[in-house]
Image (cartoon, helix red, strand yellow):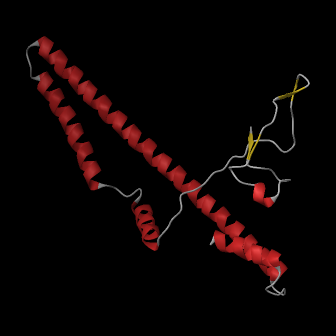
């Protein structure tokens, strides 16, 4: 089954509902075609309002600044680990002392894992932000190209030219 049409199809046939049955094999050999393939699409989320843009800008400005609550929690967990260590050193019972030391080690390992996950999350957010900025820049370049193309081809033409009307409609869809 081949879906969606191709570059040789009529404009009305280029749609996801367009289906065509194709044999996988022709005379015991795999069927090949220059017009059949795989189309990958990457889409970024659309920013739909000025409020959302301002919210993103504010989040971007505060990204990387020290969060006093996070620092306080970090200090509290380190203090808790120290408290467990000092408590363990003051206990006479060796079995209880061993359990307290194990609990201290587990707490330290948990704190370290939490810090590593936080750092990984920040890196992922920064990579995503970088990708989205690049995508936005590419989209603006494409839109500028469409505008320049429209101006060059349709600036001096009359309004009845259907190609120019189609270009104007496509340009309006992009805005």
122 over 33 or under it: above or below: below
**Residue 105 percent coordinates (x, y):** 27, 25
Residue drawn at 71 percent across, 66 percent down: 142
**Residue 74 percent coordinates (x, y):** 27, 43
- Judge from the rendering whether residue 22 lies leftward or rightward of residue 40; answer left or right: right
* Closer to the camera in the image, 141 or 58: 141
Dividing the image into 4 quarters, which one contains the C terminus?
bottom right
Picture quadrant of residue 52: bottom left
Residue drawn at 36 percent across, 40 percent down: 115
Picture quadrant of residue 114: top left
* Closer to the camera in the image, 156 or 160: 160
Picture quadrant of residue 167: bottom right
Dividing the image into 4 quarters, which one contains the N terminus?
top right
55 over 98 or under it: above or below: below
81 over 171 or under it: above or below: above
24 over 20 or under it: above or below: above
- Judge from the rendering whether residue 86 lies leftward or rightward of residue 26; answer left or right: left
* Closer to the camera in the image, 145 or 83: 145
**Residue 139 percent coordinates (x, y):** 66, 64
Residue drawn at 81 percent across, 29 percent down: 24
**Residue 153 percent coordinates (x, y):** 84, 78
Residue drawn at 48 percent across, 50 percent down: 125
* Closer to the camera in the image, 130 or 140: 140
All told, the count of numbered labels is 0
């Amino acid at each position: 089954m081949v879906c969606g049409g191709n570059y040789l199809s009529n404009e009305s046939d280029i749609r996801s509902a367009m289906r065509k049955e194709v044999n996988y094999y022709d005379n015991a050999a795999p069927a090949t075609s220059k017009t059949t393939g795989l189309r990958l699409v990457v889409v970024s989320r659309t920013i739909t309002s000025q409020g959302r843009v301002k919210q993103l800008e504010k989040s971007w400005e505060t990204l990387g600044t020290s969060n006093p609550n996070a620092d306080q929690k970090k200090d509290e967990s380190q203090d808790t680990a120290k408290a467990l260590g000092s408590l363990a050193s003051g206990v006479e019972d060796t079995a209880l002392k061993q359990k307290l030391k194990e609990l201290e080690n587990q707490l330290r390992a948990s704190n370290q894992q939490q810090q590593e996950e936080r750092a990984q999350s920040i890196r992922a957010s920064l990579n995503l932000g970088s990708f989205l900025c690049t995508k936005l820049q590419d989209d603006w370049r494409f839109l500028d190209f469409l505008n320049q193309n429209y101006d060059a081809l349709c600036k001096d033409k009359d309004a009845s030219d259907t190609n120019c009307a189609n270009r104007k409609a496509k340009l309006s869809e992009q805005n």
